[in-house]
Amino acid sequence: QVQLVESGGGSVQAGGSLRLSCVVSGYKYSTYCVGWFRQAPGKGREGVAAIDSDGGTRYADSVKGRFTISKDNAKNTLYLQMNSLKPEDTAMYYCAADVRDYGLSPMYDYWGQGTQVTVSS
């Protein structure tokens, strides 16, 4: 079992940037697939970005070209760099991990507590 703790959320004006971090601890972290999800009020949990088992990345169409997912295995940390933020990006953001490759599907076994991102127009 792994533990995940997010940080880096906050309030920013449209067009601004934020970088979210997720510290992951647990058995064989490097073998886990990881991803970022978000949930806005009244909406379901949406896959934002993920790193597949082969190291490839996936992005939701709504964030492609603006967001970048990456990880630093030496620091056991997952990142989401968010640029050109829009009001519709406002949501609670969660990091997730699993031994299975779920991509942008919210089927991961392990989740962080979430960090709020608010983008004003």
Image (spheres, grey):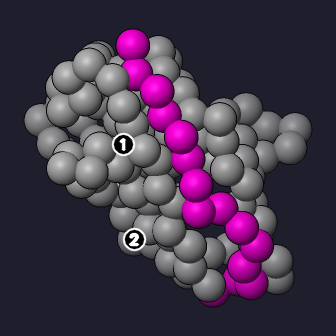
Q: Is 65 placed left or right of 13 in the picture?
A: left
Which quarter of the picture shows residue 17? Answer: bottom right
Label 2: few (<14), some (14–19) or many (≥20) C-alpha neighbours in 10 Å: few
Is the residue 71 above or below the residue 15 in the image? above
- Image quadrant in which the C terminus is located: bottom right
Report helix, strand or loop for mark 2: loop
Q: Badge 1 is on which residue?
A: 50
Q: Position of residue 31 (x, y in %)?
A: 18, 26
Report helix, strand or loop for mark 1: strand
Is the residue 116 above or below the residue 34 in the image? below
Q: Is residue 60 visible?
A: no
Which quarter of the picture shows residue 114? Answer: top right
Is the residue 56 above or below the residue 13 in the image? above
Q: Badge 2 is on which residue?
A: 65
**Residue range highlighted in magenta:** 1-15
Q: Is residue 45 visible?
A: yes
Q: CA distance from mark 1 to mark 2?
A: 14 Å
Residue at the extreme left? 54
Q: Say whether disc 1 or disc 2 marks the residue closer to the N-terminus.
A: 1
What residue is rendered at 39% in x and 37% in y? 24
What residue is rendered at 40% in x and 57% in y? 79
Residue 11 highlighted magenta (yes or no): yes
Circle 2: residue type:
Gly
Q: Position of residue 52 (x, y in %)?
A: 24, 35
